Image: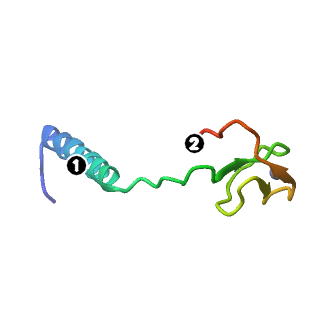
Amino acid sequence: MIRISLELAVTIYLGLGLLVLIFWFLVEASRKKTVLPRNTLWQCPVCFFFYVDSVSESLSRCPRCQTLHKREGKEVEYI
Ligand SMILES: [Zn+2]
């Protein structure tokens, strides 16, 4: 069994946690952010379900409730 002091054990524990946090930040910073084309995000006015329909321009069918609806004048905000 390897004997180490309590301070060294706490330092190693916190150091490993810090390394994992730094690695996570680096991975998140290097990921490419996906950007949807404009006017492809729809919100169903019946069930309020958000979905992406890149084919339809003004009419779209909700994949959840199958309601056919048209785009209203206001833009849907990207989240
Ligand atoms: Zn719907």
Q: Secondary structure at mark 1?
A: helix
Circle 2 packing at 10 Å, graded few (<14), some (14-19), many (20+), is few
Q: Secondary structure at mark 2?
A: loop
The amino acid at mark 1 is Leu
Q: Nearer the viewer, mark 2 or mark 1?
A: 2
Q: Residue at x 87, y 54 (%)?
A: 67
Q: Which mark is residue 19?
A: 1
Front residue of 55 and 63? 55
What quarter of the picture does the C terminus occupy? top right
Residue 17 lies left or right of residue 62; in this view the side is left
**Sequence-earlier tag: 2 or 1:** 1
Locate residue 53: give its quadrant. bottom right
User: In this rendering, is residue 53 above or below 72?
Assistant: below
Locate residue 68: give its quadrant. bottom right
Q: Residue at x 63, y 50 (%)?
A: 39
Q: Position of residue 29 (x, y in %)?
A: 31, 49
Q: Position of residue 55 (x, y in %)?
A: 68, 63
Which residue in the structure is indicated by mark 2? 78
Q: Residue at x 41, y 53 (%)?
A: 33
Is the image coloured rainbow, by chain, by secondary structure, or in one colour? Answer: rainbow
